[in-house]
Image (cartoon, helix red, strand yellow):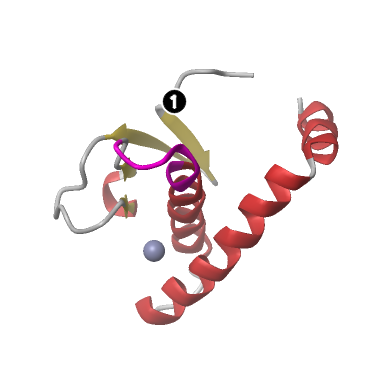
């Protein structure tokens, strides 16, 4: 398993760059910019918060890709709820994650 922080991820047909730095507006701990194919994560946070934020921003990228909703507040609500579930499923089910990862290779 990779030990370094990832610097790119793919969502649909898009390759996103992941930047590990303070967010441009300095008020968010994570930031997704679909128009620039860029996700920014504040690396000064607790590692678990970084992971949760990365999943949250990945879901924003996915929401944008599928055109989930034109309502930003609704998207934020859905992404916030889903990111907590996804992180806990990944953390609490390593055998399932390993099985899925292996099957997708
Ligand atoms: Zn969000």
Residue 49 lies in the magenta stretch: yes
- Residue at 65%, 61% in the rendered image: 85
Residue 80 visible within the image: yes
Span of residues in magenta: 44-50
- Residue at 57%, 18% in the rendered image: 2
Residue 71 visible within the image: no
Mark 1 closeness class: few <14, some 14–19, many ≥20 residues within 10 Å? few
In this view, the residue farthest toward the left is 25
Q: Secondary structure at mark 1?
A: loop
- Residue at 69%, 43% in the rendered image: 91
Determine whether, in the image, residue 44 is placed left or right of residue 90. Answer: left
Q: Quadrant of the N terminus?
A: top right
Q: Is mark 1 within 8 Å of ligand 1?
A: no
Q: For residue 104, what is the image quadrant?
A: top right
Q: Position of residue 30 (x, y in %)?
A: 33, 51
In the picture of the structure, the residue carrying the numbered disc 1 is 5
Q: Quadrant of the C terminus?
A: top right
Determine whether, in the image, residue 36 is placed left or right of residue 67. Answer: left
Determine whether, in the image, residue 96 is placed left or right of residue 73. Answer: right
Q: Position of residue 64 (x, y in %)?
A: 44, 61
Q: Position of residue 54 (x, y in %)?
A: 45, 45
Q: For residue 17, what is the image quadrant?
A: top left
Q: Position of residue 57 (x, y in %)?
A: 43, 53
């Amino acid at each position: 398993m990779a030990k370094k922080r990832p610097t790119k991820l793919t969502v649909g047909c898009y390759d996103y760059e992941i930047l590990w730095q303070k967010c441009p507006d300095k008020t968010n701990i994570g930031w997704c910019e679909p128009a620039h194919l860029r996700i920014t994560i504040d690396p000064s946070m607790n590692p678990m918060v970084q992971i949760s934020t990365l999943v949250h921003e990945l879901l924003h990228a996915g929401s944008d890709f599928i055109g989930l909703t034109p309502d930003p507040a609704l998207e934020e609500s859905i992404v916030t709820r889903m990111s907590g579930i996804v992180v806990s499923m990944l953390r609490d089910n390593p055998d399932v994650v390993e099985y899925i990862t292996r099957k997708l290779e």
